[in-house]
Image (cartoon, rainbow, N blue to C red):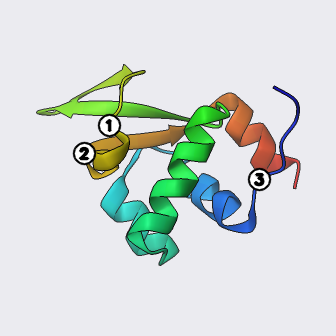
Protein backbone atom coordinates (compact mmCIF):
# COMPACT_ATOMS: atom_id res chain seq x y z
CA UNK A 1 0.00 0.00 0.00
CA UNK A 2 1.19 3.48 -0.79
CA UNK A 3 1.28 6.42 1.54
CA UNK A 4 -2.10 7.55 2.70
CA UNK A 5 -2.98 10.87 4.25
CA UNK A 6 -5.09 10.65 7.35
CA UNK A 7 -8.27 12.68 7.53
CA UNK A 8 -8.81 15.42 10.08
CA UNK A 9 -10.94 13.16 12.29
CA UNK A 10 -8.53 10.22 11.96
CA UNK A 11 -5.71 12.51 13.10
CA UNK A 12 -7.83 13.60 16.06
CA UNK A 13 -8.38 9.93 16.97
CA UNK A 14 -4.68 9.11 16.54
CA UNK A 15 -3.72 11.94 18.90
CA UNK A 16 -5.85 10.32 21.62
CA UNK A 17 -4.10 6.95 21.23
CA UNK A 18 -0.59 7.64 22.48
CA UNK A 19 -1.65 5.43 25.39
CA UNK A 20 -4.19 2.56 25.19
CA UNK A 21 -7.77 3.83 25.23
CA UNK A 22 -11.17 2.17 25.15
CA UNK A 23 -13.67 2.98 22.40
CA UNK A 24 -15.96 4.85 24.83
CA UNK A 25 -13.13 7.09 26.07
CA UNK A 26 -12.04 7.92 22.51
CA UNK A 27 -15.63 8.75 21.61
CA UNK A 28 -16.03 11.04 24.64
CA UNK A 29 -12.76 12.83 23.95
CA UNK A 30 -13.28 13.29 20.20
CA UNK A 31 -17.05 13.89 20.31
CA UNK A 32 -17.40 11.76 17.15
CA UNK A 33 -20.59 9.84 16.50
CA UNK A 34 -20.39 6.07 17.00
CA UNK A 35 -20.38 5.34 13.26
CA UNK A 36 -17.80 8.03 12.48
CA UNK A 37 -15.43 6.72 15.14
CA UNK A 38 -15.99 3.14 14.01
CA UNK A 39 -15.10 4.06 10.41
CA UNK A 40 -12.00 6.01 11.49
CA UNK A 41 -10.79 3.15 13.69
CA UNK A 42 -11.29 0.60 10.90
CA UNK A 43 -9.31 2.81 8.50
CA UNK A 44 -6.52 3.40 11.02
CA UNK A 45 -6.34 -0.34 11.79
CA UNK A 46 -6.23 -1.31 8.11
CA UNK A 47 -3.37 1.09 7.38
CA UNK A 48 -1.37 0.00 10.43
CA UNK A 49 -1.61 3.30 12.30
CA UNK A 50 -3.21 1.70 15.37
CA UNK A 51 -3.49 -1.75 16.97
CA UNK A 52 -6.43 -3.40 18.72
CA UNK A 53 -6.19 -5.09 22.10
CA UNK A 54 -8.56 -7.41 23.94
CA UNK A 55 -9.01 -6.96 27.67
CA UNK A 56 -9.34 -9.93 29.98
CA UNK A 57 -9.63 -8.71 33.54
CA UNK A 58 -6.63 -6.44 34.11
CA UNK A 59 -4.64 -7.89 31.21
CA UNK A 60 -4.49 -6.63 27.64
CA UNK A 61 -3.41 -8.74 24.69
CA UNK A 62 -2.75 -7.60 21.14
CA UNK A 63 -5.22 -9.10 18.70
CA UNK A 64 -5.36 -9.19 14.94
CA UNK A 65 -8.94 -10.47 15.09
CA UNK A 66 -11.46 -7.79 15.98
CA UNK A 67 -15.17 -7.60 15.35
CA UNK A 68 -15.82 -4.44 13.35
CA UNK A 69 -19.44 -4.49 14.52
CA UNK A 70 -18.33 -4.46 18.16
CA UNK A 71 -15.28 -2.21 18.29
CA UNK A 72 -16.52 -0.89 21.63
CA UNK A 73 -15.28 -4.20 23.12
CA UNK A 74 -11.65 -3.37 22.29
CA UNK A 75 -8.87 -1.05 23.37
CA UNK A 76 -6.72 0.80 20.84
CA UNK A 77 -3.24 2.29 20.74
CA UNK A 78 -1.20 4.05 18.07
CA UNK A 79 1.65 2.10 16.48
CA UNK A 80 5.05 3.63 15.82
CA UNK A 81 3.79 4.28 12.26
CA UNK A 82 0.78 6.10 13.71
CA UNK A 83 2.94 8.16 16.06
CA UNK A 84 5.16 9.15 13.13
CA UNK A 85 2.03 10.26 11.27
CA UNK A 86 1.10 12.53 14.18
CA UNK A 87 4.59 14.05 14.28
CA UNK A 88 4.75 14.62 10.54
CA UNK A 89 1.65 16.84 10.44
Q: Is residue 85 left or right of residue 44?
A: right
Upstream in sequence: badge 2 or badge 1 = 1
Indicate which disc, 3 or 2, sits on the residue closer to the N terminus. Answer: 3
Callout 1 environment at 10 Å: few (<14), some (14 to 19), or many (20+)?
few
* Alpha-carbon span between mark 2 and mark 1: 8 Å
Mark 3: few/some/many CA within 10 Å (<14, 14-19, 20+) = some
Residue 48 x %, y %: 64, 30
Residue that numbered label 3 is attached to: 6
Q: How many marks?
A: 3
Residue 67 badge: 1
How far apart marks 1 and 3 lie (CA) works out to 22 Å
Picture quadrant where residue 64 is located: top left
Position of residue 34 relative to residue 69, above or below, is below
Mark 2 or mark 1: which is in front?
1
The numbered disc on residue 52 is: none
Q: Does 71 appear above or below 30?
A: above
Q: Quadrant of residue 20?
A: top left
Question: Extreme bottom residue here?
Answer: 31
Q: Is residue 58 left or right of residue 76?
A: left
Quarter holding residue 73:
top left
Q: Which mark is residue 73?
A: 2
- Which residue reaches farthest front? 69
Amino acid sequence: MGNRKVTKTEKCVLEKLIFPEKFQVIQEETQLLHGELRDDLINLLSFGFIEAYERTGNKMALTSFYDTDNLQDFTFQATSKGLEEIKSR
